[in-house]
């Protein structure tokens, strides 16, 4: 069997969303005669631990190598800065604002050193560096230059082409140099959507024939869809609409809240029937105030960050799953990772974000409704789903389309890329 070195700074026990891409595809690699070998951090910055993820990684990954920078070893424990004082604030400022290409840059040297040892010991056939952090890509490029092992750069997010990662002029110039230098050592790139792939091609960052689409995927075992024994208490007499995750600067629920307000005004019979569950790092004063202003706070329930298994249980017990993309046109290249959690539980999805890659998947799978960030469009789309629920008229999911996004099928695409570059 061939071996691939996977450079993934985010890996269990971290609860970062990025871990699921590597976990789900890495699990299936041996089915296609590839053994995953992980290079990750021992004590990474800024994440919470989730032991359920660690248990799954130990089950399917037998070759895990961990290395940390000296600074990480000194000041980080379980993903967090040990001391909450001025020194910690200074370190955080240094990591976020001074380091290039990102706050994980100090991991570069120890990761390259460890990577060289792994390549020699494990007889690695290909390297798969998943970004971000973008430091992981630079590690992969350095290993390719030193060993000649072919490199696949896997973009979950664009780097210097992203409108959301713009930095001051000098830092942007330096990062652009680093990215293009990295790509010169790259055999192929993958992107999570076709619009993202086209961004790299049209910007002359990488040739079309060596650029591939590799979406995220779902795996019912790793997502605890079956045999989920978590206990939650959603009211059975309500229609539960659930959002899990985090809200970002350009990805907020305000138009959704306005749409709910309009729905209640025109259809008062739903006022006492709907409950909205916001689950994750989203219990902030601005959203609560907005809900109060629109008189729907009594319909809302806020739950803080949960272990992954419990968050999935929320989805399984819900009736409608809320998915958001940002307002700006650039958002159309992104497919929120939680979409694949939603696909796994097979509940109706209300997607707010216009056209683009997520809407295409939802429409082809026939698993929900899509609309723009317009309160009337949101109300109308939600009414379509509610009418189906009231009539017990389930969406007839297109399983042949849905199966394209299961982890086995997606991993086969990944393996085909590996085979094309070795």
Image: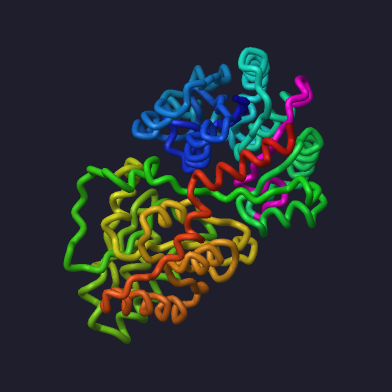
Tell me: residue 134, above or below residue 343.
above
Q: Is residue 361 magenta?
A: no
- The answer to whether any part of residue 335 appears in the image is yes
Residue 206: x and y in percent read 79, 47
Q: Residue at x 30, y 55 (%)?
A: 316
Tell me: residue 62, above or below residue 217.
above
Quadrant where the N terminus sits is top right
Residue 272: x and y in percent read 20, 74
- Tell whether 98 sits left or right of 309: right
Tell me: residue 283, above or below residue 300.
above
Q: Which residues are magenta?
A: 144-163
Q: Nearer the viewer, residue 58 or 173?
A: 58
Q: Nearer the viewer, residue 310 or 164?
A: 310
Q: Nearer the viewer, residue 277 or 261?
A: 277
- All told, the count of numbered labels is 0
Q: Residue at x 29, y 74 (%)?
A: 389
- Tell whether 280 sits left or right of 239: right
Residue 256: x and y in percent read 42, 70
- Tell whether 18 sits left or right of 332: left
Indicate the quadrant where residue 105 lies. top right
Q: Is residue 157 magenta?
A: yes
Indicate the quadrant where residue 36 lies. top right
Residue 68: x and y in percent read 55, 20
Q: Residue at x 42, y 52 (%)?
A: 341
């Amino acid at each position: 069997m061939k071996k691939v070195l996977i450079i993934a700074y985010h890996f269990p026990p971290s609860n970062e969303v990025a871990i699921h891409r590597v976990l789900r595809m890495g699990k299936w690699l041996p089915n296609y005669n590839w053994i995953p070998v992980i290079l990750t951090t021992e004590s990474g910055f800024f994440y919470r631990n989730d032991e359920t993820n660690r248990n799954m990684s130990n089950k399917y990954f037998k070759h895990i190598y961990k290395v940390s920078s000296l600074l990480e070893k000194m000041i980080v424990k379980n993903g967090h800065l040990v001391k909450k004082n001025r020194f910690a604030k200074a370190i955080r400022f240094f990591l976020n604002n001074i380091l290039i290409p990102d706050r994980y840059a100090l991991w570069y040297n120890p990761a390259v050193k460890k990577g060289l040892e792994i390549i020699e010991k494990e007889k690695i056939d290909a390297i798969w560096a998943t970004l971000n952090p973008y430091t992981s890509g630079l590690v992969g490029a350095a290993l390719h230059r030193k060993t000649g092992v072919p490199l696949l750069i896997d973009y979950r997010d664009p780097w210097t082409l992203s409108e959301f990662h713009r930095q001051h002029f000098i830092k942007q110039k330096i990062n652009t140099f680093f990215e293009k230098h990295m790509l010169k050592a790259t055999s192929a790139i993958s992107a999570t959507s076709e619009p993202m792939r086209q961004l790299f091609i049209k910007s002359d960052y990488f040739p079309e024939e060596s650029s591939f689409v590799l979406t995220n995927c779902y795996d019912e075992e790793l997502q605890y869809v079956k045999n989920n024994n978590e206990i939650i208490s959603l009211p059975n007499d309500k229609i539960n609409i659930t959002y899990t995750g985090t809200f970002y600067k350009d990805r907020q629920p305000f138009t959704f809240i306005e749409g709910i307000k309009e729905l209640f005004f025109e259809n008062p019979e739903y006022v006492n029937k709907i409950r909205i569950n916001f689950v994750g790092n989203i219990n902030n004063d601005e959203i609560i105030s907005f809900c109060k202003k629109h008189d729907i706070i009594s319909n809302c329930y806020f739950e803080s960050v949960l272990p992954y298994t419990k968050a999935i249980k929320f989805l399984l017990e819900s009736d409608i799953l809320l998915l958001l993309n940002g307002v700006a046109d650039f958002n159309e290249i992104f497919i929120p990772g939680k979409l694949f959690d939603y696909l796994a539980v097979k509940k109706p999805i209300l997607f707010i974000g216009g056209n683009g890659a997520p809407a295409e998947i939802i429409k082809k799978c026939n698993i929900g409704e899509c609309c723009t960030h317009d309160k009337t469009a949101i109300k109308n789309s939600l009414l379509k789903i509610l009418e189906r629920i009231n009539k017990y008229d389930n969406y007839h999911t297109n399983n042949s389309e849905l199966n394209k996004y299961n982890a086995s099928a997606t991993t086969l695409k990944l393996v085909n890329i590996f085979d094309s570059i070795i």
